[in-house]
């Protein structure tokens, strides 16, 4: 029997093996997780709502099924949590907005329903920025980075990252509209996937910007990300924008670089990027080359226009998403989300068309680059581990904001999949993240590369508490 004190930092696939072998029970694991949440989350503020009764009911049912020899999936009996913008039947869903404090969905989001069908245990709903934009609502707590409370925990899936990094769930679901899976994963030392747009259903998910929103997994390893993706991905008749199902054969995905062509644009990787991150990226490139991958010089399309346009692009769609409550209840909104919506409402149709044309041009140019290689390497952000004060100063500087999202938002605009994963630490011991970017529907290649990197490094096995 593995003691509960040793359980909370296991990777999901490790825990799955223990559960299926009978060495650990879903009830034991869930009780340990709930106790850890009770002990630590008063300081971390990662959960908007814990669901202990539901979790224990699901854990007991999983245990009964497993004892009968019925295993639904590798996730059977594993406690996870979801960002508080996914509908959960009979459990409040607020999207980080006091305006929705009394909203109780009558059905699950498709991704939540698929997790239930897989036998996972829902520990609760995780805190997020207001409406999934940049800043938490001023009336609600902000999750604290477990590595250092004085540093950014990422936006907007910050609660999802903090809970997973601190051992308060084994994995989580997040969303990414401009970097909101990748930023929190980089800040908290996690692995997270922004899939191809449409790979995962958005039905039952509060919108920020429909054509930019991506639903994806956040976990402790690329293998765990793959487990979650294989559960939640696939066509959903309730979401007509979802892509046809493509089976991801987990046992057949190699964990080696040999044969992979990795594109590198040195000028792009160093454009305003801090030396500590440049050094971390060079270390990853060495590992790829030593592992049998080949490095190819490429020229990235200019990302400045799409990253500069991102807020306008997002703002128009956010204004549409909030039309039922804004501006009628504008006084209940926080300042950041209000500013985004006001900007979107003020934009002319002609100016928005120019934004869309820039997006189409970038998408086409990026497709041409990715036709030459299997994946690209990039930083998640140009500077490591920003403090809250540094982030606050960005709000006053449009160019600094563009720099922050220059390696993330363009791929929301284009819809290409990206895998964020740890690639080292600062001198102060805070995590640094990088990302792999691939062609559309090539998540298996991303996970293969992530697994290959994590096979020969231990960055993802270092924990904050």
Image (cartoon, grey):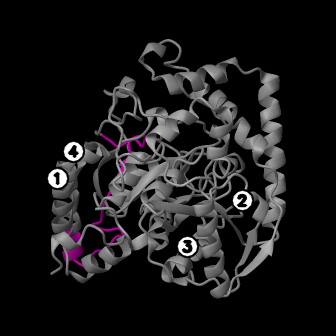
Q: How far apart are marks 4 and 2 (CA)?
A: 40 Å
Q: In which quarter of the image is residue 275?
A: bottom right
Q: Residues within 10 Å of mark 3 (few under 14, many from 20)?
A: many
Q: What element carries label 3?
A: helix
Query: Does the magenta-highlighted stretch encompass residue 2?
Result: no
Would residue 64 be seen by someone viewing this image from the given angle?
A: no
Compared across the picture, whether 274 is left or right of 325 comes to right
- Discs 4, 1 touching: Cβ within 8 Å: no
- Discs 1, 3 touching: Cβ within 8 Å: no
Residue at figure coordinates x 49%, y 79% from the top left: 457
Tell me residue 294's x, y (percent).
74, 81
The residue identified by callout 4 is: 42
Residue at figure coordinates x 36%, y 52% from the top left: 148
Q: Is residue 319 above or below residue 409?
A: above
Q: Residue 438's mark?
A: none
Q: Earlier in the sequence, mark 3 or mark 4?
A: 4
* Span highlighted in magenta in the image: 63-89
Q: Earlier in the sequence, mark 2 or mark 3?
A: 2
Q: Which of marks 1 and 3 is in front?
A: 1
The residue identified by callout 2 is: 270
What is the number of callouts on the image? 4
Q: In this view, does 454 lie above or below 343?
A: below
Q: Which of marks 4 and 2 is nearer the N terminus?
A: 4
Q: Distance between the residues labelled 3 and 4?
A: 33 Å
Q: What element carries label 4?
A: helix
The residue identified by callout 1 is: 39
Q: Earlier in the sequence, mark 2 or mark 1?
A: 1
Question: Which quadrant is home to the N terminus?
Answer: bottom left
The residue identified by callout 3 is: 450
- Discs 4, 2 touching: Cβ within 8 Å: no
């Amino acid at each position: 029997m593995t003691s509960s004190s040793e359980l909370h930092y296991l990777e999901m696939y490790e825990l799955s093996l223990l559960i299926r072998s009978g060495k650990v029970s879903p009830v034991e694991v869930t009780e340990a997780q709930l106790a850890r949440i009770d002990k630590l989350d008063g300081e971390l503020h990662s959960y908007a709502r814990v669901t202990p009764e539901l979790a224990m009911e699901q854990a007991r049912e999983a245990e009964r099924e497993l004892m009968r020899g019925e295993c639904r999936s590798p996730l059977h009996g594993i406690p996870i949590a979801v960002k508080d913008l996914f509908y959960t039947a009979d459990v409040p869903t607020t999207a980080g907005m006091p305006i929705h404090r009394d909203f109780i969905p009558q059905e699950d989001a498709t991704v939540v329903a698929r997790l239930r069908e897989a036998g996972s245990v829902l520990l609760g709903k995780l805190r997020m920025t207001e409406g999934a934009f940049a800043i938490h609502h001023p009336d609600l707590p902000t999750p604290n980075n477990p590595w250092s409370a004085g540093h950014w925990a990422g936006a907007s899936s910050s609660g999802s990252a903090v809970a997973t990094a601190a051992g308060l769930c084994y994995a989580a679901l997040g969303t990414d509209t401009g970097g909101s899976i990748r930023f929190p994963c980089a800040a908290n030392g996690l692995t997270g996937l922004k899939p191809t747009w449409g790979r995962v259903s958005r039905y039952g998910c509060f919108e920020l910007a429909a054509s930019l929103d991506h639903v994806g997994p956040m976990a402790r390893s690329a293998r765990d990300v793959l487990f979650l993706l294989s559960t939640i991905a696939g066509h959903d008749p309730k979401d007509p924008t979802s892509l046809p199902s493509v089976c991801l054969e987990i046992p057949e995905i190699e964990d080696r670089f040999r044969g992979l062509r990795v594109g590198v644009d040195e000028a792009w990787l160093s454009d305003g990027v801090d030396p500590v991150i440049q050094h971390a990226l060079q270390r990853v490139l060495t590992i790829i080359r030593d592992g049998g991958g080949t490095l190819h010089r490429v020229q990235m399309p200019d990302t400045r226009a799409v990253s500069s346009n991102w807020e306008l692009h997002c703002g128009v769609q956010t204004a549409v998403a909030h039309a039922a409550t804004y501006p009628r209840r504008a006084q209940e909104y926080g300042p950041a989300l209000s500013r985004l919506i006001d900007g979107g409402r003020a934009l002319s149709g002609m100016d928005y068309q120019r934004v869309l044309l820039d997006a189409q041009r970038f998408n086409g140019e990026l497709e041409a680059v990715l036709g030459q290689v299997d994946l690209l390497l990039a930083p998640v952000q140009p500077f490591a581990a920003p403090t809250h004060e540094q982030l606050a100063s960005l709000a006053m500087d449009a160019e600094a904001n563009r720099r922050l999202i220059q390696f993330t938002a363009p791929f929301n605009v284009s819809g290409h999949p990206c895998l964020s994963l740890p690639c080292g630490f600062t001198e102060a011991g805070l995590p640094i993240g990088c990302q792999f970017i691939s062609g559309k529907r090539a998540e298996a290649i991303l996970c293969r590369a992530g697994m290959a990197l994590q096979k020969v490094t231990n960055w993802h096995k270092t924990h904050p508490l």
